[in-house]
Image: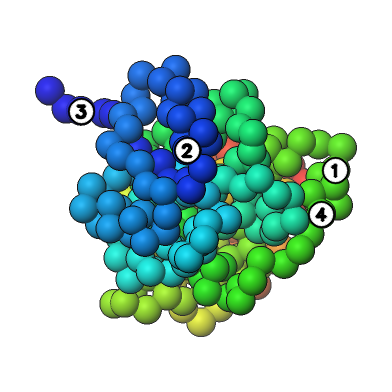
């Protein structure tokens, strides 16, 4: 029988924080605690040895801190990372976009549940690798975390529920990572478990599902016009109606794309 447990490592230099987090995680049947670490150096060793699916990683630790742990493992396959911090003067907005998630101490049970749900989604949709590539890129760009008051980041909407859309995609190819600005993407089509991102001069291949791609792009700009096609509406020049309620889209670069009648609502602003 396949084991669907999420193998989890807890990292914190405060024994009480470790104990409290472990107790809270006992409420989640699919969370399997495979170990704990009280410092960054021990965390690196245990991540390499245990190869957990998920790590709750404290940011503020003596010696190697949470950022240093990720840097030390940057060239290896990372688990999903959830940062934990007792301070609100960190770039939490950046963590929300680039890391799997973050938690403020003391850990709120409802917020912890939201984080676990997000981890389950990432595992089921196989997007952890893409998230970790962005996390490494972010941390490498920071000599020290910028001081941003949490009160300045939070708006009337809870940050946990604020929808974040991608500003770029990280395309991994033969050990290199190419950053593709989403505004340069003219259209996207699916090829099995891969997405073909078409820009003006190149087609980039990204391992992703169409369902998840829908979630990552701003729906006001990137419209699903077919079960396997998304188009940047800013790139549309003409629409030609065809039989059966279908349309042929002519893009500014001359490309022709077929729109299914089942997705006609996506084109209502042009009709």
What residue is pinned by disc 3? Answer: 3
Marked residue nearer the N-terminal end (4 or 3): 3
Residue at screen point 37% across, 47% down: 37
Q: Is residue 191 left or right of residue 13?
A: left
Instruction: Between label 2 and label 4, give the one nearer the viewer.
Output: 2
Task: Tell me which label, 4 or 1, sits earlier in the chain.
Answer: 4
Position above or below: 3 against 215: above
Q: Element at badge 3? A: loop
Residue drawn at (41%, 20%) of the image: 26
- Proximity of marks 2 and 4: CB atoms separated by less than 8 Å: no
Label 2 vs 4, first from the N-terminus: 2
Sort mark 1 into few (<14), some (14-19) or many (20+) by Cα contacts within 10 Å. Answer: few
Q: CA distance from mark 2 to mark 1?
A: 34 Å
Element on which disc 4 rests = loop
Quarter holding residue 1: top left
Circle 4 residue: 149
- For the point 54% across and 68% down, which residue is it? 139
First in sequence: mark 3 or mark 1? 3
- Is residue 48 visible in the rendered structure shown here? yes
Quarter of the image where one finds residue 73: bottom left
The residue that disc 2 covers is 15
Per the image, the residue denoted by label 1 is: 155
Residue 151, percent across and down? 85, 47
């Amino acid at each position: 029988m396949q084991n669907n447990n999420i193998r989890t490592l807890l990292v914190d230099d405060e024994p009480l924080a470790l104990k409290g987090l472990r107790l809270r995680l006992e409420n989640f049947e699919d969370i399997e605690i495979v170990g704990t670490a009280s410092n960054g150096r021990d965390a690196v060793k245990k991540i390499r040895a245990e190869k957990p699916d998920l790590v709750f990683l404290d940011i503020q630790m003596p010696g190697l801190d949470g950022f240093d742990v990720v840097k030390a493992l940057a060239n290896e396959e990372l688990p999903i990372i959830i940062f934990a911090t007792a301070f609100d003067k960190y770039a939490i907005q950046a963590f929300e976009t680039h890391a799997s998630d973050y938690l403020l101490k003391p850990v709120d049970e409802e917020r912890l549940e939201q984080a676990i749900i997000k981890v389950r989604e990432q595992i089921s949709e196989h997007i952890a690798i893409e998230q970790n590539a962005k996390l490494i890129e972010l941390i490498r760009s920071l000599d020290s975390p910028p001081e941003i008051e949490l009160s300045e980041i939070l708006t009337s909407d809870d940050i946990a529920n604020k929808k974040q859309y991608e500003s770029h995609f990280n395309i991994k190819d033969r050990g290199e990572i190419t950053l593709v600005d989403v505004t340069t993407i003219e259209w996207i089509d699916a090829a099995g478990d891969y997405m073909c991102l078409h820009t003006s001069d190149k087609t980039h291949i990204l391992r992703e599902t169409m369902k998840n791609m829908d979630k990552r792009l701003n729906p006001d700009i990137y419209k699903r016009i077919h079960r396997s096609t998304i188009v940047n509406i800013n790139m549309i020049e003409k629409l030609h109606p065809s039989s059966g309620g279908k349309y042929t889209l002519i893009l500014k670069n001359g490309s022709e794309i077929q729109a299914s009648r089942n997705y006609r609502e996506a084109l209502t602003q042009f009709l």
